[in-house]
Each structure stands twice: as structure tokens, then as C-alpha cells.
Amino acid sequence: MYLTILATEESYGVAKIAEFYDKGGIIMYALTFCSLLTLAVIVFKALSLAQKNVLPNDMQKVVGHYIQNPNDTAVEQLALEASKGESVLARLTQTVMNRRESGDQKIRDALQAKAHQEIVKLQGGIQVLDVVIVVSPLLGLLGTASGITTVFDGLSSLQDVKMNIMAAGVAEALSTTIAGLAVAVPAVIGHSFFNRKIETYASQLEVTCDDLVNAVTERQDKVA
């Protein structure tokens, strides 16, 4: 009995979704594509911006140990961990270690170039959300305009007002507007969240790498 009721409710839900699509017309398919694209980007960015890919705790501990006590053992351990290049911090550290004998300014120049490259990679995919944020409401507005046009078609002849055509036009206008906003809202939330996360990572990386460069140059000055 319970399974029968559940199946009935599921069929009803599918029917309502199909009806909603029919009311919105062809624009609903474009909005569906935008919705799936937004979901794919959000999942991709959530995985790529995981802490283990940017600022893993193990790598932070190795860098911190070197900064506090830059001895030969710490240098070897840091160089070994950096050579793996499994995170943004590891690749930036590798840049510093590869140029540790080049002098402070050359190290910082190379680090700045590498950091810019890594930040651009972290921002990959965010541009897609920018497009969705702009396009989805416009598609909804296009559907609204199309629906209103249908309404006026129904009013074109006062002697024979076609109520079914007018109702279809209103339904199309409302459905696409709702769908456009429903797609844009998650895209805006994801865009803001990921941008904020990247800014936080960038700030932490800047502080850590600056301390690392200072420790490396001080050590090289002592060795020299």
C-alpha cells in the first residue's frame, strides 16, 4: 500500500514537472542546460578548492618547521615535500627552493609569477558562473516577453477573446521568470562563496610564502 502511494506521488511529481516545462516552452530547455552547467561547475570547484589541493596541513607543518628552524634536515624535508607538487603551496615552495641561491628579489619575482599562475588556475570555472548569472535572468525575461506577446495575441480581437491562449501566455511568462531566477540564485551563491574562498587562500599563501622567502634568504646569507 505504502509503495503504491509513493509511486503515485512520484508520478504526480513527474507530471507537474512536465507540465511546468510545457508552460515555459523551449526556453526552459536552455535554462535546464544553464542549471546543469551551474551544478557541474559548483561540484568541480568544491573539489578543486578543497584544502588538500591548496593548503594541506602536512605541507603547512613542513614549511612552518623550516621557517622556525631552517637547518639542513628541514631543507631536505621541505625540498622533498615540495618536489611532489601535489598542492598549490607545494608548487610555490618548489619555486622558492629551486631559486634559493638567486637572491631575494629574483626569488620574489619568480614566486609572484608562479603565484599569479596558480591563482588563475584556482579561478578556473568561475567565469562560467558569471555567464550563467547574466544569461539565466535574461532567458527568463525573454520567456516573459514571449508570454506577454501571446497574451496580447489573445486580446487582439475584442469580439473573440481567446482565454486559453491568454492563460498559456501568462503561464509561459511566469514559468520562465521563475526558472531564470531559480537558476541564477545558486550561481550567485556559488560565485560569491568560491571567490571569497580563493581570496582567503591567496591571503594565507601570501603570508606563508613571504615568511618562507625571508627564512630562505636569511639562511643563504648565513651560508655565504
Image: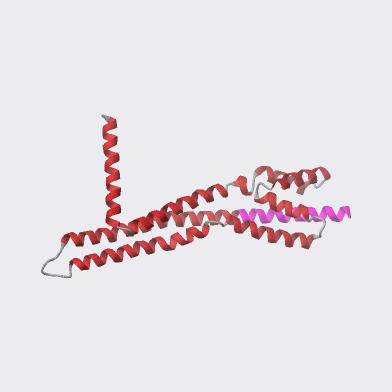
The residue at the far top in this view is: 1
Q: Residue at x 75, y 44 (%)?
A: 80
Q: How many marks?
A: 0
Question: What type of secondary structure mainly makes up the magenta span?
Answer: helix
Q: Residue at x 83, y 45 (%)?
A: 72
When asked about the image quadrant of residue 144, the answer is: bottom left
Percent coordinates x, y for residue 193 in the rendering? 51, 54
Measured along the vertical axis of the image, is residue 57 above or below residue 30?
above
73 sits left or right of 5 in the view: right
* Quarter of the figure with the C terminus: bottom right
The residue at the far right in this view is: 224
Percent coordinates x, y for residue 157 in the rendering? 14, 70
* Quarter of the figure with the N terminus: top left
Percent coordinates x, y for residue 205 in the rendering? 66, 54
The residue at the far left in this view is: 159
Q: Which residue is drawn at 48% across and 58% down?
A: 129
When asked about the image quadrant of residue 195, the answer is: bottom right
Percent coordinates x, y for residue 179 in the rendering? 35, 56
- Would you say residue 99 sits in the magenta stretch? no
- Would you say residue 208 sits in the magenta stretch? yes
Measured along the vertical axis of the image, is residue 12 above or below residue 24?
above
Q: How is the image coloured?
A: secondary structure
Q: Give the range drawn in magenta.
A: 201-224
Q: Residue at x 67, y 58 (%)?
A: 115
